[in-house]
Amino acid sequence: MTDLATLQRVDAETLHRKMTGEHAPIIINALDHDAFIAKHIPGSINIPTEDAEIAKQVIPFRDAEIVVYCANADCTASPELAQKLEEMGYTNVSDFEEGLSGWRKAGYELIGNEA
């Protein structure tokens, strides 16, 4: 079981740089589907924490770079999903702890019907 204190973390600037680089990570919004439709980081996919098993179908490579996020630093969905992914054997998982609020605060765009 992964200790949340040892979970890899990434900040907005690092995530944005990785997204625009040659090998962009898989970015996962850990919130429910309605929240994802409302607003999300461009290019991210939606795997709600309670549906973590979906990852096995959409991310076949266990060593893929994955970054999970949720609403903000107080939200527990992304660290919980990161832990579940690591328990499923994914080896390169990071949490973008500041989430949607940190992304917007850093000046980056969100998309969705409420963005």
Image (spheres, helix red, strand yellow):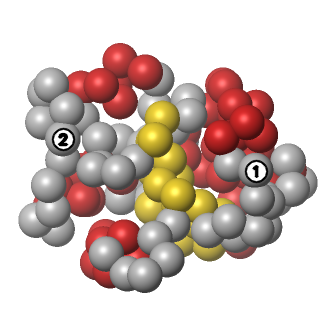
Residue 103 located left or right of residue 109: right
Q: Of 15 and 43, which appears nearest the observer? A: 43
Q: Residue at x 73, y 36 (%)?
A: 57
Label 1 to label 2: alpha-carbon separation: 26 Å
* Residue pointed to by mark 2: 111
Q: Is residue 111 left or right of residue 89?
A: left
Q: Quadrant of the N terminus?
A: bottom right
Q: Is residue 27 left or right of residue 12?
A: right
The answer, for residue 74, to whether it is visible in the render is no
Q: Split into 4 quadrants, where in the image is the C terminus? A: top left
Q: Is residue 91 left or right of residue 94?
A: right
Q: Residues within 10 Å of mark 1 (few under 14, many from 20)?
A: few
Residue ID for mark 1: 60
Q: Position of residue 63 (x, y in %)?
A: 76, 68
| Percent position of residue 5, x then y | 68, 67
Q: Is residue 50 above or below residue 107?
A: above
Give percent across and percent down for residue 62: 79, 60
| Camera-nearest residue between 37 and 86 | 37
- The residue drawn where x is 65% and y is 40% is 58
Identify the residue at horizontal 14%, vertical 55% (top origin): 109
Q: Nearer the viewer, mark 1 or mark 2?
A: 1
Discs 1, 2 touching: Cβ within 8 Å: no
Give the residue type that dot 2 points to: Ile
